[in-house]
């Protein structure tokens, strides 16, 4: 049975259990399981215990609290937490303690969530396995020899293992959905602009988006409701009210048109993954959804357009790490140029350096038109593909990943092979639409398979509704 934070919150409200008791149960379990999983870079149990006590005291006094007060949560180490170090799993930021909270962290605190630690990730969110973390690789709770996916691998592993069942991640090209699929939990990348990026350490600003991990779609809906909304600190956040995602979960989904794009079921898709997704589609049909064929003809250019765009943006976003303001500074260097060069050589890992070099190259004069500009044109075509497809259907269903979790070390020597594992997720970020991965069976090795459900811009209500009813109906 998946762990439900919404139910736990109801028990907290009814005073059947205290926040302190929740912590006393969680922390030893978390510490023990984390020894195998390496899901956390930093743990803050003492602070979480103290805050749990505060919640209990306020509740005892009869203070009006958020319905979610006292729920524990883990936060990806790319999201700034005041007073708790935020490393991006990089040597560059190993000792960086942010002087402020990201907007999402402020919102979590206002709702009385208790942050238990910061989760491991690929350095600066660049990767698909957490093997690019400067510190250690996180393991998949379904099989410790395998990767949990990435870049939010620590958050996915923690949520799937229930340490705790709620975590935050970030998704630039699949970093929430792919690890959710690999670990067997739910992960949502909201519409671009649905959740504030203020305090999210930038990788590729036109693609980055924060989102929730949970074991149930219901918890995912609850957490999105907490995180979403316009923020004056992020000009790309979308104005307008936030729907009550939880209340919407039980609505009638009969007649929902589910688009199936042939391009996502072509060569390269593991037959066992395909079989599970096909069973998933049958379940949706059983719930009264109508399956229609759609086309996303520019899918094959998605990976190239994504890697040109994200590396270009990363090369400029990461220029700030020069040893002057943030993080690591090399000692014993001569002038400022030498100091910056040495700092960057020491502070960044191989993949981050590769991306900065690629990004600088695609932006350089003479190559800009051929690479960066062309990628932006392809991005527009991909966006139009989705707009056209959503003229024929309400939601689109695809596999989240072409394979189940691979073994640690299997793809580290070949970056291109690693990049190709993002083939079904990057297009969603390029188009700015929302995508969610929900567990959809297991392969013959017992490894989780994830089904991706995609909605148009701001279509999260309908997306969560269908995903919720799918999760209740689909045995896996
Ligand atoms: N795996 C993709 C990459 O390496 C996506 C990363 C992400 O979404 N942050 O860029």
Image: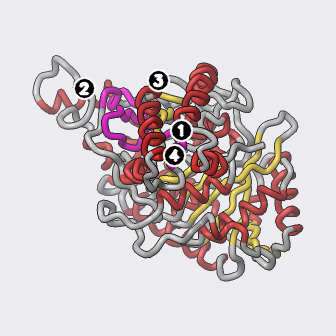
Is 68 positioned to the left or the right of 249 in the image?
Answer: left
Spatial CA distance of label 3 from label 2 is 20 Å
Spatial CA distance of label 4 from label 1 is 20 Å
- Circle number at residue 135: 3
**SS type, badge 1:** helix
- Identify the residue under disc 1: 19
Nearer to me, 34 or 425: 34
Q: Earlier in the sequence, mark 3 or mark 2?
A: 3
Q: Earlier in the sequence, mark 2 or mark 4?
A: 4
Relative to residue 19, is residue 288 depicted above or below?
below
- Circle number at residue 168: 4
Looking at the rendering, the stretch of residues picked out in magenta corresponds to 69-96
| Cβ atoms under marks 1 and 2 closer than 8 Å | no
- x, y (%) of residue 331? 19, 19
- Identify the residue under disc 2: 342
Callout in the foreground (3, 4): 4
């Amino acid at each position: 049975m998946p762990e439900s934070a919404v139910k736990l919150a109801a028990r907290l409200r009814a005073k059947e259990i205290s926040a302190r008791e929740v912590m006393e149960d969680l922390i030893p379990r978390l510490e023990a399981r984390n020894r195998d999983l390496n899901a956390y870079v930093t743990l803050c149990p003492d602070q979480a215990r103290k805050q749990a006590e505060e919640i209990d005291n306020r509740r005892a006094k009869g203070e009006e609290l958020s319905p979610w007060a006292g729920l524990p949560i883990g936060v990806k180490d790319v999201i700034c937490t005041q007073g708790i170090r935020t490393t991006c799993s990089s040597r560059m930021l190993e000792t960086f303690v942010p002087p402020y909270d990201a907007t999402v962290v402020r919102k979590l605190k206002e709702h009385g969530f208790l942050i238990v630690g910061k989760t491991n990730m690929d350095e600066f969110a660049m990767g698909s396995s957490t093997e690019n973390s400067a510190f250690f690789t996180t393991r998949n709770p379904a099989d410790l020899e395998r990767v949990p996916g990435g870049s939010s691998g620590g958050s996915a592993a923690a949520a799937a293992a229930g340490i705790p069942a709620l975590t935050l991640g970030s998704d630039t090209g699949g970093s929430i959905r792919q690890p959710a699929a690999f670990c067997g939990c739910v992960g949502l990348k909201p519409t671009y602009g649905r959740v504030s990026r203020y305090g999210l350490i930038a990788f590729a600003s036109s693609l980055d988006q924060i989102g929730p991990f949970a074991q149930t779609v219901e918890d995912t809906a609850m957490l999105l409701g907490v995180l979403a909304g316009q923020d004056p600190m992020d000009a790309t956040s979308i104005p307008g009210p936030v729907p009550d995602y939880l209340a919407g979960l039980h609505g009638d989904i009969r007649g929902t048109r589910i688009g199936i794009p042939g391009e996502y079921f072509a060569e390269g898709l593991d037959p066992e993954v395909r079989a599970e997704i096909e069973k998933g589609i049958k379940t949706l049909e059983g719930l009264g959804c109508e399956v229609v064929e759609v086309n996303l003809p520019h899918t094959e250019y998605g990976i190239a357009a994504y890697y040109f765009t994200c590396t270009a943006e990363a090369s400029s976003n990461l220029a700030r790490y020069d040893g002057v303001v943030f993080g690591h500074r090399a000692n014993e260097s001569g002038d400022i140029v030498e100091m910056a060069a040495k700092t960057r050589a020491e502070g960044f890992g191989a993949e981050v350096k590769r991306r900065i070099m690629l990004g600088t190259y695609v932006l350089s004069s003479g190559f800009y038109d051929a690479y960066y500009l062309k990628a932006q044109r392809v991005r527009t075509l991909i966006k139009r593909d989705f707009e056209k497809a959503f003229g024929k259907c309400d939601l689109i269903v695809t596999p989240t990943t072409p394979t189940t979790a691979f073994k640690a070390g299997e793809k580290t020597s070949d970056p291109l092979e690693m990049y190709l594992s993002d083939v079904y997720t990057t297009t969603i970020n390029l188009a700015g639409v929302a995508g969610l991965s929900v567990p959809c069976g297991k392969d013959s090795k017992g490894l989780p398979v994830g089904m991706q459900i995609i909605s148009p811009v701001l279509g999260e209500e309908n997306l969560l509704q269908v995903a919720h009813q799918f999760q209740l109906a689909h045995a896996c």
